[in-house]
Image: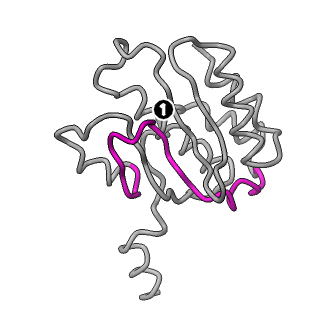
Amino acid sequence: LGTFAMMCYSIIHCGTLRRALSRGARFYGLVTDDFRIGFRQEGDKAILSVVGLNPDHDPEHFIAESLLMIWHGLGSWLVNKRIPLLEARFAYPPPAHAEEYRALFFAPMAFEAGETAVVFSTSLLDLPIVQSETSLKDFLLTSPARLLVKLKNDTSLTAQIRQILR
């Protein structure tokens, strides 16, 4: 209890999204043996992954998928901009409800991908953290549950049509 909040306090002054995600991943590596948050760059792609260290604890992959959504939402909140995903990867076969993942991740999906991760452009890693300890206090009143509700997708077809009509 309180681990997510302490992690948030440890990253709020990191300056950039890159430093915040890197520090946050390291933080969780210190405090839990249940999962590992990975953060790395491969060329022009930033990859945020979740590895469950005991598959028996998450047989339906709910925890791993929730953590991906929470970390994506946290990063978006930190920079006050929805981070568009290039891809959502899952290390397991597609479940019966796989089509629902499109509404959760707004990205192309790859199953049996060797890892469970979200991928976005490294160009976003240098975005500044615009939140403060003051805004963090309000944010934490409803987090991390609030992060499971997706931020507005400004790149969706609906959003593009609204922009054209405006």
Residue 142 on image: x %, y %: 53, 33
Closer to us: 89 or 64: 89
Element type at marker 1?
Answer: helix
Q: Position of residue 66 (x, y in %)?
A: 42, 33
User: What's drawn in magenta, residue-wise?
Assistant: 105-129
Q: Residue at left 20%, top 42%? A: 97
Neighbor class of circle 1 (other Cα within 10 Å; few <14, some 14-19, many 20+) is many
Residue depicted at 33% across the width and 44% down the height: 111
* Residue 34 in picture, x, y percent from top left: 51, 14
Residue at the extreme left of the image, as rendered: 96
Residue that carries the numbered disc 1 in the rendered image: 67
Q: Quadrant of the N terminus?
A: top right
Q: Quadrant of residue 19?
A: top right
Q: Is residue 112 rendered magenta in the image? A: yes
Query: Eyeballing the image, is 127 above or below 71?
Result: below
Q: How is the image coloured?
A: one colour
Q: Position of residue 87 (x, y in %)?
A: 45, 54
Q: Residue at x 83, y 46 (%)?
A: 15
Residue 116 versus residue 160 in the image, above or below: above
Amino acid identity at mark 1:
Leu
Viewer-proximal residue, 11 or 52? 52
